[in-house]
Image (tube, coloured by chain):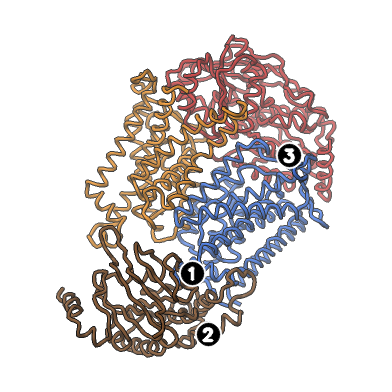
Chain colours: A orange, B red, C brown, D blue
Amino acid sequence: MSALLLIEQILNGLQSGVMLFLMAAGLTLVFGVMGLINLAHGSLYMVGAFAAAGAAAATGSFVVALVAALAAAAAAGALIEMLVIRRLYERDHLDQVLATFALILILSEGTRWLFGSFPLYLDVPDWLSGSVTLPGGIQYPLYRLAIIVVGLAVAAGLFGLISRTRLGIRIRAGEADREMIAALGVDISKLYTMVFALGAALAGLAGALVGAIQSVQVGMGEPVLILAFVVIVIGGIGSIKGAFIGALLVGLTETLGGVLLPQLFGLFMDPSAATTVGASLASMAIYILMAVVLIWRPSGLFGVRA
Amino acid sequence: MKMTKLAALAAATMLAGMPAAWAEGVKVGMITTLSGGGAGLGIDARDGFMLAVKLAGRDDLDVVIEDDQRKPEIAVQLADKMIQSEKVDVLTGIIWSNLAMAVVPAAVAQGKFYLSVNAAPSALAGKGCNPNYFSVSYQNDNLHEAAGAYLAKAGFKKPFILAPNYPAGKDSLTGMKRFYTGELAGEVYTKLGQTDYAAEIAQIRASGADSVFFFLPGGMGISFMKQYADSGVNLPVVGPAFSFDQGILGAVGQAALGVKNTSQWSKDIDNAANKAFVDGFQAEYGRLPSLYAAQGFDTANLLISAMNKADVKDADAFRAALKEADFPSVRGKFSFASNNHPIQDIYVREVVMEGDVITNKIVDTAMTDHANAYVDACKM
Amino acid sequence: MTDPVLVTHDICKSFGALQASRDISLDLRPGEIHALIGPNGAGKSTLIKQIAGGLRPDRGTVQFLGRDVTALDTAARARMGLARTFQISALAMEYTVLQNAVLGALGARGGVFRFFGNVLKDNDLRSAAEAALDRVGLSDQAGTVTGELSHGQRRLLEVAVALTLRPKAFLMDEPMAGLGADGSKRLTGFLDGLRDEAPILLVEHDMDAVFALADRISVLVYGQIIATGTAAEIRENPEVRKAYLGEEDQ
Amino acid sequence: MNRETIINLLIALGLIAVPLWAIWADEPFIITLATKVAILALAGVGLNIALGLGGLVSFGHAAFFGIGGYAMGILASHAQNYTPMMEWPLLIEGTKSMPVIWLVAVLASALAALLIGVLSLRTSGVYFIMITLAFGQMLYYFAISWPAYGGEDGLSIYVRNGFPGLNTLDPAQFLALCYAVLFVVLFLSSRLAKSAFGLALSGARQNEDRLRTVGIEPFRLRLVAFVISGAVTGLAGALYADLNRFVSPTMFSWHMSGEIMVFVILGGVARLFGPVAGAALFIVMEHLLGGISEYWQVFLGLTLLGVVLFARGGLIGTLAGRKVTHD
């Protein structure tokens, strides 16, 4: 494989990693601050994509679609938090898993009820379509570059938010000690709703951005959800930095594994068997990565020992 | 065939003690996917089927419809329910091959008829064929074979081919290569359910291919086409109809324009039955029909044609009536090969814009009177 | 004099910049109650954890019954006969008092991997458990769910479970905490008789109990033992007075 | 007799009465549904040993369910095609005998549980939930892309496997067999809960420090519990495959893990009959709601949500009140 192709594939891995980070950030924040496992996070990703597709169909503007995705996912998140999630903070993980599993069923089929059974249309806007030539002669889709830029910007913004702002201070305090933050006179239930809505908005944004180059359909959030879980477990639950590193690791492993493994096996097997074995192994690669990380560090790369 | 004998034994034992079934008319059990991600296909097949029943005005045709959730285990249990409790004569409706593999062998072994509206895996066409099993759609390999034939005919020298890493994906590439025997620029199996094809597209770009053939059903194909169109790789794309069918084109959008795809049906096939179907479907459901709807429609009409000739209780006569395929197919010519799979023409369609609707138009015929590769393997 | 049962030798432990244990050496001799006192945050709990096996010291060794147990985990030390009670009750709260005691007896006897017989009908275990409950006066509560016990009763149950282990030494982390005057007095009386069975390393804030019980007292301040001696010696020790008076100033 | 015992008896009576009625009323599908309830309940009973007694929230029990299913599928497919599984170094043939299949299913899933357990039990809490999920997904993708036994298409077995002295093709006899297995396992599991092992395992869930302090290392206990739990769920998988005469990778999917967990929680965690009540309720709902609306899963979701939020302790917890652990 040529060096250029390898660089292009690394860019692809980076791009999918950055999107995974948007998903994982919300998941890990919600866990870190509220101690909640949210299986329905993938449904918020789906809500974002559907809202974007709806808004784009109505207005024709991609920017409006992104705003709609953020708003709809944040609103859905806030609503879900107030109606359901806040009753779960004091419960054990088991109840959280079951309740949010139920939410998946409701949100998925509810969305299908509203939008019908066929995939929706959402496309890259004209001003971001086509590809650009990068230094070294790599042709790369402009939209994917834009995704990488947006993702990194959001990541930077999130780090800034957590480390610099009052909300961030409260979030960190909430992670450390719930009673302390209540004692500081912060309205904790409002804080929780905000954190949950923030996580939902990030998921919704990811859904809309990815929806433009993938398929906007019911159930689109579930594979991403599982990947996002793998990410935060690898990174260490509750750690934004861990989620970032984990997302890039998973994105790169998945992309490069799919390309390199079949070629690797091709060195000593006949091509069709190599393709099969390589592809099979590639589809398990991230889970193997996760198992290895957890065996090495049971609390993930940046997790605090429970 | 030992299998069949054993199966017949099972059927006999299971049937023992069951009371006489429905006294008159035909009871049909339709097991199809009505919820979850793949629901669109099942809904289309159901709507097409029910449209035919409605247009024929048959009140001696009773259809029980159940949702298999695209889970093979659920499909098996529903089949048990249809057979044991509903006492249906005919089963139909399954979209996915893996579900068909779970349901069909046991159902036909119990003496039921199975008419496939879509799934037609090779295992049921060759060694595992059965006189009571009819595929009204195609044999799974057909559209891929046609795509291969078209690539060869159109003079492409170096296609890059890809499909998901699961049995239907492997059948697809095998089928394609059966009729395209030239050089390949690359052959890639992707992960089932994969949504990002950047890596594969980069490989295509680097491979020096002159065309792309892909089989990526459902959301996978939508993702691939959108990303491909945006990648700046401008090689011609050929594929089976699945990723360019009416239900999906809306989601792919303009990215699909110009793509050649192979299909045994198109809404512009010029015959009376097809016109009645397309108009009737739009009037009834307010949307354009899809391939799946057409297959559902033909399936119901095949069934009705057999009902006009024989009583379903007389299995031999009914089977013979089905095999005659004496119904006006929306595809025009239609007959069954000896393994109960269609002999039909397969067209090349191009995705075009008609007004503000993206749809397909026939531009060529890839294969004429094509049957399938498993006819000889089927001994019945 | 016979050899000490339990010895720590120059134990050091730090958490980041905080040095929680500095070269701590102490011993527990047969038949004695050795009290460990010190202001809050002096590192008593950290030391107890290292002795019990929950924490590994950075440096230094722990010897129990003449054997270096520094590398052994809590369970292994417990099986050797090191019985511990917790500052905050660590009991199976859904279980009855009897079940908690039987669990202790089971740990002492071994044979956890028995999957069939009803463990509460195992006569050996049950009589060991009942005997221990009887000694602390919890017999009439045997059927009560532990979560419903009063604070004081839980402390007693902790001691009872420790008894079922037929220990060679006790590690007791503030057994008097929250007991009230009456309860403290009774427990004091009970522990007084226990020292002949096995020596006790007692961490306690209740000074009346400490001075009433302890044969020797060690004072821990900022992770360091500043004095060890009899009650009278400790009372007179100027450094100890300074440490405690200093605390009272705050 | 306390209330939970009475409820358990009522559930057991119901389990037996419903199929008897179905035979009388000639509703053979009800018998199939009852069989499904019994088998899924068995899978839940398996999970309940890890989850209820041990507090090990495994989100990957579909792995064992699937392994059990494939044990059946692989053995029976070799037997039905008359091809040996292995010729060298020793000849291993397929089989259509349920007892042999069960034994293989139990051993294979126990071995898998041992391997997964050794790695997973190093973690706890959410990490444990997620790593078990990951192992399940790993097997799922493996099953899909492994071509030898059908890949995503799965494997059809044309005739149900046999059990000495029974005609398993008769739905009623197969149901009776599944009931027998379920009740035997329920009995063993009730003994397990009261045994020395159960006392220690549940003690480890309630307070890990307590267990260490009495000299018992929780890791080995949990590992053994996880293995037993996986083996029981694997047995259920083999039966489920026989019910459907079919296996496919969906048995490995995380939805399956979720559903098994739902049975347990719906019925009542750590209750002997919890998984039975949960599986019965779930399947009845699926059956009834499926007939009402295309969007029935919305209502299923709402019901589940209602149970978690307002009926804590599941069905049996709500009916029987607080758990009584002593005798």
Graded by Cα atoms within 10 Å as few (under 14), some (14 to 19) or many (20 or more), the crowding at tag 3 reads many
Chain label for disc 2 = C
Residue furthest front in the image: C1
Q: Amino acid at mark 2?
A: Glu
Q: Residue at x 58, y 59 (%)?
A: D278
From mark 2 to mark 1, how far is it between C-alphas? 25 Å
Task: Give the spatial CA distance, label 2 vs label 3.
Answer: 71 Å
State which chain disc 3 sits on: B
Which residue does the image show at 50% across and 30% down from the upper left?
A260
Same chain? Circles 2 and 1: yes
Residue B239 sits in quarter: top right
* Kind of residue at disc 1: Ala
Residue tagged 1: C76
Q: In front: B83, or D192?
A: D192
- Quick one: B280 or C203, which is closer to the camera? C203
Q: What is the x, y in percent for residue C239? A: 18, 78
Label 1 – label 3 distance at C-alpha: 70 Å
